[in-house]
Image (cartoon, rainbow, N blue to C red):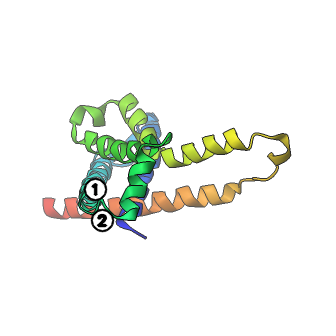
Amino acid sequence: MSLYQITQWCFFGFGVYNLIYLLWKHISYLKNKINLQAIDKAATATLILAGSIYTLTFVTDWIFIFIHSESEESQHLFSRLKGPYGFSLYTQQLSYIFFSLIFLLKFVRKISLLRLIFGCILMLNFERIVIITTSIHRDYLPSSWTMYQPFWGAFIIDWLLKFIIFCSFTTVIYFIQNRTKK
């Protein structure tokens, strides 16, 4: 498990949290039960921290790639960037960086429609979209329609695991923020 994976799980977890938060925020009888502002402040702090860590590791990795540009792995990466699906390599990272750090702005945190759009973008996985697109393009034959049957329990467990990891980090940041206030 790498730092990239943990931060990507936090991005996805924030997307799921964001959907729950927006639903909870607009249901009037649930609004007064929990202090949503304190929880949301901790959740956005978790997202911003994950985005900052992801940015640092992304920049560090690319510095090492350019320093060792003569290696075979770097040459392979550069050829993938120039290929037909090269956009999936840098679009994913740049969207994680941009959409996680955009939550530093207060108006983005306040406007529900922006939160919904940015949260859904953080949940996207461009590499998976490219894999699905190329699989459909190459294997769109009636004889291969029954080859892949998704196990929906695995999707639910995956989403739940990512959400729990994000919530655990958010809980730690929530208690740190409230402990320093006293």
Q: What percent of the width, then of the height, locates residue 171? A: 34, 62
| In the foreground, 71 or 80 | 71
Identified at 59% across, 47% down, the residue is: 131
Identified at 37% across, 35% down, the residue is: 115
Q: CA distance from mark 2 to mark 1?
A: 31 Å
**Which residue, as the protein is rendered here, is positioned at the far right?**
143
Q: Amino acid at mark 2?
A: Val
Residue receiving disc 1: 62
Query: Is residue 167 in sight in this rendering?
Result: no
| In the foreground, 27 or 97 | 97
Residue receiving disc 2: 172
Q: Residue 46 appears in which quarter of the rendering?
A: bottom left
Q: Amino acid at mark 1?
A: Trp
Q: What percent of the width, then of the height, locates residue 123? A: 47, 45
The quadrant in which the C terminus is found is: bottom left
137 with respect to 80 (left or right): right
Query: Is residue 52 in sight in this rendering?
Result: yes
Q: Secondary structure at mark 2?
A: helix
**Which residue, as the protein is rendered here, is positioned at the far front?**
70
| In the foreground, 154 or 142 | 142
Q: Secondary structure at mark 1?
A: helix
Mark 1 packing: few (<14 Cα in 10 Å), some, or many (20+)?
A: few
